[in-house]
Image: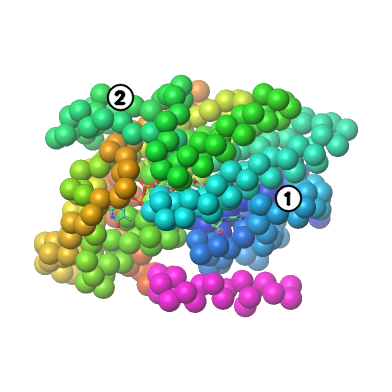
Amino acid sequence: MRFQRNIIITGGAGFIGSHVVRLFVNKYPDYHIINLDKLTYAGNLANLKDIENKQNYTFVKADICDFETICQLMEKFQADGIIHLAAESHVDRSIKDPFTFARTNVMGTLSLLQAAKLYWEAQTEGYEGKRFYHISTDEVYGALELTHPEGIKSGHSAHRVYGDDFFHETTKYNPHSPYSASKASSDHFVRAFHDTYGMPTIVTNCSNNYGPYQFPEKLIPLFINNIRHRKALPVYGKGENVRDWLYVEDHARAIDLIFHKGQVADTYNIGGFNEWKNIDIIKVIIKTVDRLLGNPEGYSSDLITYVTDRKGHDMRYAIDSSKLHRELGWEPSLQFEEGIEKTVQWYLENPEWMNNVTSGDYQRYYDEMYKGR
Ligand code: NAD
Ligand code: DAU
């Protein structure tokens, strides 16, 4: 079958990647979507059970650092677009093992860029109609001050903001963790490939995502699962750090819009104008889980356990995504209250997904489904 476009999505078995793959496979039956993923501990093909047999979907197990294989795959699938999400994504892991982050996030991105460059430059039409879209994080900008520890009402939303400043597209990079340093480095390589070779690249920097299929090492799914099992909720430091939260499907919608309509060589910030102190979000999670499980109000509050702070813990992230709204009309579709309700409900209604992850069984899915295909 001949497709209108052939798009490689890297990291499609991960949290955000699986939502992007699902959106593209369902919305664009004329596109061939190739999910290229190494299936590290964070990759889970069960995230894509509902679309795995679609005609326009192909899964390929590969490592983005394996340059030869990536070159072959570019050619085999005649890829004209890359949406690059594959990465090591967890800050705590980067503090313990920075080398893996440099390898995957920096060298892996460079390997993809070079493979795309060689393949596209060999085409008669060159870079015409091609796109290399790199998904990055707001953490590259560093950390903002908590100038309003109690929060003040903002012009942007009904929510509170905790400082005077925001991350803009022009904010100077100032990463602090090995994770954010590796993402910053990969962003620089992507822009360098535009500036040096004319590759049609785009970079977006997004705030904290939440929603279904997130690996339970991250705050929200970890805490929902711990409450369900009456386990301690480890709050780093005083729980005063602030993050801006965005429902994952809204991020996927933004990626779709920017992939198709974004300006080449440009950068867009994506965020929810939705700042929360960790301890406040934790209280919302406790309240929601308790209500949905039929527990009395406050039942799980005793699980809150203050623990040693994360090393180099960034105080506040707050994204200004007004450029994306102004230029492409994007805005989050869900209020946080709705998003967190949907999220908690999903984890409570899908205990088999969580049990498969926590038991490690999910890592057998590839062998059962794909070996010998
Ligand atoms: P994730 O950890 O859930 O998934 C990462 C995926 O990449 C996994 O499927 C994993 O198997 C795959 N992968 C890792 N190393 C690979 C390699 N060498 N080759 C091929 N595949 C490999 O990550 P996520 O939270 O979905 O984040 C996806 C992207 O979005 C990352 O680039 C991350 O930096 C960025 N981001 C995440 C957030 C967030 O809140 N989660 C916010 C902003 C940006
Ligand atoms: O800002 C975007 C980034 O958001 C992404 O680039 C990262 O890939 C993603 O992991 C996320 O990074 P954070 O470090 O902000 O997310 P995490 O869920 O690990 O932590 C959220 C906040 O909660 C952070 O301030 C640390 C705190 N925390 C986290 C865990 C796991 C705790 O207090 N206790 C915990 O057990």
Q: Amino acid at mark 1?
A: Phe
**Residue type at tag 2:** Asp
Q: Where is mark 1, residue-wise?
A: 67
Q: Is residue 171 in view from this perspective?
A: yes
> Residue 58 lies in magenta, yes or no?
no
The secondary structure type at the circle numbered 2 is loop
Does any portion of residue 90 appear in the rendered image? no
The answer to whether residue 364 is magenta is yes
Q: Residue at x 70, y 25 (%)?
A: 196
Badge number at residue 165: 2
**Residue in view at x 65 percent, y 52 percent:** 64
Left or right? Give the position of 227 relative to 174. left
SS class, disc 1: helix
Kindly identify the residue that appears in the image at 76 percent across and 55 percent down. Answer: 69
Q: Say which quarter of the image contains residue 141.
A: top left
Instruction: Bin the neighbour count of mark 2 within 10 Å (Cα to Cα): few under 14, some 14-19, many 20 and up.
Output: some
Tell me the quarter of the image containing the N terminus. Answer: bottom right
Dominant SS in magenta: helix
